[in-house]
């Protein structure tokens, strides 16, 4: 399968210097905690950078969707953001959205493109997908560099991020009606 960048329908997010600093702080804290607990990075020279980029992606997705960014670390089995949202950084403009076998089927997975050197932004959000639906496509399974198999959803197959934004807004309005 050929993967290509899909710009139509992408949202672009700018983070302020303060927001980027918070993401850098949380990413470096997560990396340090991981080292202190004896975990090793797949690519040691990129370990801290990968953690920081992940936090930048989370914050960009939260800002785009207008939801709270909890800045959590060690949330391996919980969603990154409220509304059952997991955020995955795409490290090259044309890569697909990674969905792993252990990702819960009902998880909403948001793609944020953050190419090497692009930490200052803007951050491109090409869309999102539901994990269980991605797992129904054997043609998307890849196993690069002797890693475990995963699904790489091509960017042209992603749902528009505005549809997730609308779902979240509807969820919020429903919840506000229920609160006395």
Image (cartoon, helix red, strand yellow):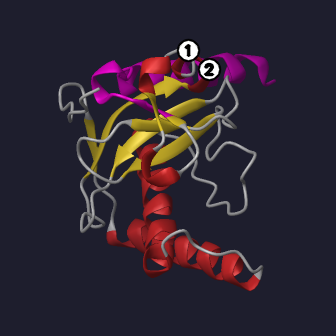
Please name the residue shown 48% across and 72% down the image.
43
| In the displayed structure image, the side of residue 161 where residue 34 appears, left or right | right
**Closest to the observer, 26 or 171:** 26
Q: Are marks 1 and 2 in contact (CB under 8 Å)?
A: yes
Q: Residue at x 65, y 34 (%)?
A: 101
- Secondary structure, mark 2, is helix
Disc 1 marks which residue? 136
Q: State which region is magenta.
A: 151-180
Q: Residue 112 location, x and y as percent?
A: 38, 45
Residue at image coords 48%, 46%: 88
Residue assigned mark 2: 132
Residue 36 seen in the current view:
yes
Q: Quadrant of the C terminus?
A: top right
The furthest residue to the front: 146
Image vertical order of residue 71 relative to residue 61, above or below: below
Which image quadrant: the N terminus?
Answer: top left
């Amino acid at each position: 399968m050929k993967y290509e960048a899909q710009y139509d329908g992408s949202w672009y997010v700018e983070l302020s210097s303060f927001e980027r600093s918070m993401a850098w702080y949380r990413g470096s804290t997560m990396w340090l905690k991981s080292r202190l607990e004896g975990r090793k990075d797949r690519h040691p020279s990129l370990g801290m950078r990968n953690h920081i980029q992940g936090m930048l992606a989370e914050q960009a997705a939260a800002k785009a969707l207008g939801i709270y960014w909890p800045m959590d670390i060690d949330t391996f089995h919980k969603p990154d953001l409220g509304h059952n949202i997991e955020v995955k950084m795409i490290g090259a403009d044309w890569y697909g959205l990674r969905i792993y076998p252990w990702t819960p089927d009902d998880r909403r997975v948001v793609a944020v493109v953050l190419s090497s050197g692009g930490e200052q932004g803007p951050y491109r959000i090409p869309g999102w997908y539901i994990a269980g639906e991605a797992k129904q496509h054997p043609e998307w399974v890849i196993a690069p560099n002797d890693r475990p198999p995963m699904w790489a959803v091509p960017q042209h197959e992603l749902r528009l991020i505005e549809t997730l934004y609308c779902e979240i807004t509807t969820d919020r309005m429903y919840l506000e009606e229920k609160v006395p």
